[in-house]
Image: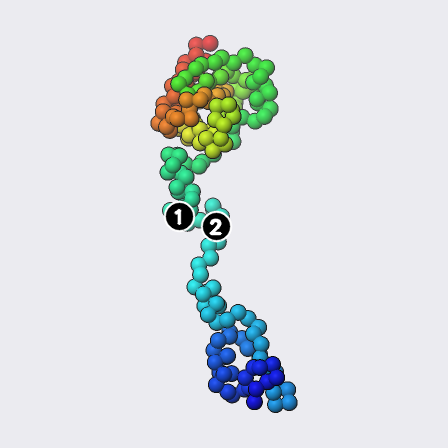
Amino acid sequence: MVASYGLPATGSSEAMKLRKKYSTVDFFPTAGTVWAYETHISAEKEKAIKNTRISQAIRHDQRPSGLVAPAQKGQSEAFGVGFLQMPRKNSLSHADFVRIDMAKFRRERGSYFILSFGILYGQKTLGIKASCVVSKKTAPRAVDRNLIKRRWREAMRECLPFLSAPATLIFYAMRPANNASYKDIKKDVAALVSLSRAKLRAS
């Protein structure tokens, strides 16, 4: 018997096909007539969803060693450096910049940076503090400014283990830094740091 809604009755071949097609079918017998309706998606769609790989975000501390996200790997290779941040103890705060404006710092010019250096009052136990400033005039695009800062940061991190005397170093990027490679920036940063150390010792 066919239901008034045009759906096959229980036990018919059409009803069996309907059971195979849908993942869940509920039957409600009423006066010898049955109605069927789909309560979930079809079995074919359900199978496709199960076979679909859904990527989930993984926290950095939960990520297994050696696992690098494709986007991060590509950016790292393009920059030629990693994404490690400068240690907090070696970073300059906003308050430090206010004090630097009132202090008399020396300046040295390199190939890609202008270094402003000196010793802040009360910095004898603070060690080295450094920062890089890249203005929009130097690099109009944010991606270029970030690239220069990343390369400077990595170059500066390699110099930190060899610096012990207290000093404050501020690197102001110049326009040639836009086209400079990491190797060039590293060389310029090392030369300016060495020059500032020599002049601070002599003073």
In the image, what residue occupies the spot 57% across and 73% down? 39
Q: Residue 73: which quarter of the image?
A: top left
Residue 46: percent from the left, percent from the top? 48, 68
**Amino acid type of the residue that numbered disc 1 sits on in the rendered structure:** Leu
Residue 191: percent from the left, percent from the top? 38, 19
**Relative vertical location of residue 87 with respect to residue 188 in this rendering, above or below:** below
Residue 180: percent from the left, percent from the top? 38, 26
Q: Is residue 148 left or right of residue 97?
A: left
The earlier-in-sequence mark between 2 and 1 is 2
Check disc 1: other Cα within 10 Å, few if <14, some if 14-19, many if 20+: few
Residue 131 appears in view? no
**Amino acid type of the residue that numbered disc 2 sits on in the rendered structure:** Ile
Instruction: Return the residue nearer the eye: 45 or 5.
Output: 5
**Relative vertical location of residue 122 with respect to residue 42 in this rendering, above or below:** above
Q: Which mark is residue 58?
A: 2
Instruction: Return the residue nearer the eye: 161 or 35.
Output: 35
Instruction: Return the residue nearer the eye: 10 or 157.
Output: 10
Q: Is residue 191 left or right of residue 104?
A: left
Tag 2, which secondary structure? Answer: loop
In the image, what residue occupies the spot 53% across and 69% down? 41
The residue most toward the top is 203
Q: Which mark is residue 67?
A: 1
Tag 1, which secondary structure? Answer: loop
Q: Residue 186: which quarter of the image?
A: top left
Q: Which mark is residue 140?
A: none
How is colour applied across the structure in the image?
Answer: rainbow
In the image, what residue occupies the spot 56% across and 82% down? 7
Total tally of numbered discs in the picture: 2
Q: Are marks 2 and 1 in contact (CB under 8 Å)?
A: yes
Instruction: Return the residue nearer the eye: 174 or 57.
Output: 174
Residue 36: percent from the left, percent from the top? 58, 79
